[in-house]
Amino acid sequence: MKKLLILLIVCISLTGCSKKACDVNAGELCFDEETNQYIIEENAKIVVAVENAEFGIALIDLWNQTHPENYNVIEYIVQNEYDGNTYLNQRADVSLMWSNEATRLHNWLMPIDDLVKEEIKPTLCLQYGADLNHDDFYYVPMFGYGWVFSYNASMMEELGIDLTDENNDGRPDLFGSFELIMENFDLNMESIYRDQVIQSIFEFNFTDASQAMTYLSLNGFIPFENFKAEEPGFESEQFLGTLEILSTLGQFQFSNLEETTFESYLSDQNQLFGLVGTWMHYDDFETMTEQDFRFIPFPSANEKTVTPYTLSAGYVISKSTKYPNAALEVIRLIRSNEGLEAFARTSSYPLLYNYNQPVKKEEDKQLELQFKTENLKEISEAMMFGKEESMVAFELDPAVRGWAMISRAKIYSVLEEVFYQRLLPVDAQNKIIEQINIEMKPYIPEIEEETEDTK
């Protein structure tokens, strides 16, 4: 027994014989700390879905430069749709999906290794895909699709409005907040632009849910912030503050327009500010109307960030991939400086990138990304502050999302009543809570009354 013990001690101290080598070809994740890369599986082939062929070619070149010993591992397919059905049918190893679709299909996805997560996290806008990534990291947000705040720079320059941004927050100082807009702009001045009287400072829209959801955040309020569908949070003081700000805004004359369309801001040349959807032909409108529309973060309210609705699409790894190490290397390359530069240069969508990440070393300084257009660059910077609908679902019925209750309860029409002074904020809050509770009742567990038998 004593001899056996001595042999064990010698074995452990001299050879580390209990250590097991990582077997990359057996499906294990194997990271080489010396090269700072994953060890690629033998004869690996990875199919990557990309928005366009130009980025696919750039990604192959980047792979071959980084892994010359594993040449041409990547094959790309151009993906035009980012829904779940497309993902399931094309069977790519690394694919693009809308975040809400990825959340629905998370059981089909491979969690992304913590080493990759920690490496790419500083460049990510982490609010995108937050529901999906809450318990594990599956989803890498890549580009945005939604609403962006805009101002007509041509109109303002002709009117002599100062567009200086001394505090460098991405917004001219005169309209960095709604409080400043109300202080510095007045429709009663009857300003003339291109022989027209300016009819609108900004148009609040409550009929389109994707626009109206923006105004939930006027006081920094975020529904379902604790990731529970059963607790939307409308009873909070923070949400009451949202309604009070909305009531204050409604007392100011923002517009004389009786009716607007989504694109009237771009076409009618009589509004100072507007919301622009990324799907709108804003470049064409600039050319046709010979105007310069600028895109900036939403004005703050009560010193809180206001978050317009944005949907994101991002990269995921299929759970069925045969080459998880190679797939993880693809994700690392896509979010590397070179990968991000290639995406910005080739994509028709605004890149989701954290321009406010802390810079600790000179080599970590912010990228000077070159986009296809200046508008895409501005939209990319503005989308740092966007927000998605929450995808959290009820425990009693995971097929039903908490956010569905917001639509069913018709809370945006209540917001409109507050804005037009037809309902006091506290009464509106009670009405919203009542309507939400009615809609949620079938999905909330009933608490059994205590009886003599259950005591």
Image: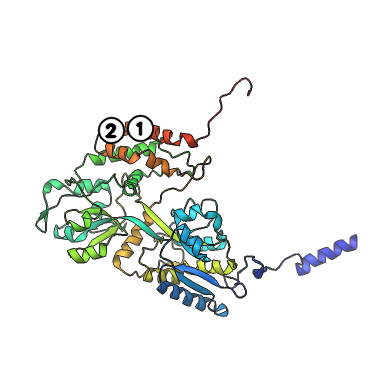
Q: Residues within 10 Å of mark 1 (few under 14, many from 20)?
A: some
Q: As shown in the figure, which amino acid type bears the numbered disc 2?
A: Leu
Q: Which mark is residue 431?
A: 1
Q: Where is residue 229 shown, x and y percent of the image?
A: 47, 42
Is the residue under label 1 in contact with that under label 2 (CB below 8 Å)? yes
The N terminus, quarter of image: bottom right
**Mark 2, residue position:** 423
Q: Where is residue 212 shown, x and y percent of the image?
A: 32, 46
Q: Residue at x 50, y 73 (%)?
A: 75
Distance from the alpha carbon under mark 2 to that under mark 1: 10 Å
Q: Where is residue 70 shown, x and y percent of the image?
A: 57, 77
Q: Which mark is residue 403?
A: none
In the image, 262 versus 215, the foreground residue is 262
In the figure, 196 relative to 371: above or below?
above
In the figure, 397 relative to 384: above or below?
above
The C terminus, quarter of image: top right
